[in-house]
Image (tube, grey):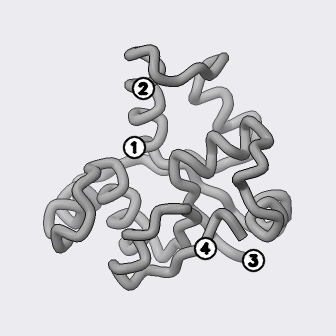
Amino acid sequence: MRRILLDSCVWLWWLDDNPALGQQAKALISDARNQLFISAATVWEIAIKRQKGNLQIEGDLQSLVLEDGFIALNIDLFHAQQAAMLPPIHQDPFDRMLIAQAQAEGLELMTADTLIPKYGINVILARV
């Protein structure tokens, strides 16, 4: 069993059955033995993009998380504190939160972002 946190792009690719999501990544997401997490930060980021008209996604985001059997990962005070203490390799606050949550919760982070592995966390490349 693996415990995997999906970043925003990965979750959107999964929902869209986008070919950008690699076969190994799809297999890991499809494997019922794995625990898959979606952060509140991801839902927040996607909701903002949708509100601005930069993203078309139908339905209630919380329902989409739960319907696919993903585990909702809330942001707590420790996560917020850890995100603020990360070195300034990455400037995106949503990605910084995902990095902090992956560290704090012992999760692997599935992403296509090439900066995230520089934080020394366990990363699963989403395009593989």
Q: Nearer the viewer, residue 53 or 76?
A: 53
Whether pointer 3 and pointer 4 mark residues with C-beta atoms closer than 8 Å, the reply is no
How many neighbours does mark 4 have within 10 angstroms: few (below 14), some (14-19), or many (20 or more)? Answer: some
Q: Position of residue 19 (x, y in %)?
A: 78, 49
Of marks 3 and 2, which one's residue comes earlier in the chain? Answer: 3
User: For mark 2, what is the residue?
Assistant: 49
How many neighbours does mark 3 have within 10 angstroms: few (below 14), some (14-19), or many (20 or more)? Answer: few
Residue type pointed to by label 1: Ala
Q: Position of residue 2 (x, y in %)?
A: 69, 75
Q: Residue furthest bottom?
A: 120
| Circle 2 SS class | helix
Question: Which quadrant of the structure image shows residue 120?
Answer: bottom left
How many neighbours does mark 2 have within 10 angstroms: few (below 14), some (14-19), or many (20 or more)? Answer: some
User: For mark 3, what is the residue?
Assistant: 1
User: For mark 4, what is the residue?
Assistant: 124
Foreground mark, 1 or 4, reads: 4
> In this rendering, would 3 be left or right of 128?
left
User: For mark 1, what is the residue?
Assistant: 41
Which residue is depicted at the point 48% across and 76% down? Answer: 106
Of marks 4 and 2, which one's residue comes earlier in the chain? Answer: 2
Which residue is depicted at the point 33% across and 78% down? Answer: 119
Residue type pointed to by label 2: Lys
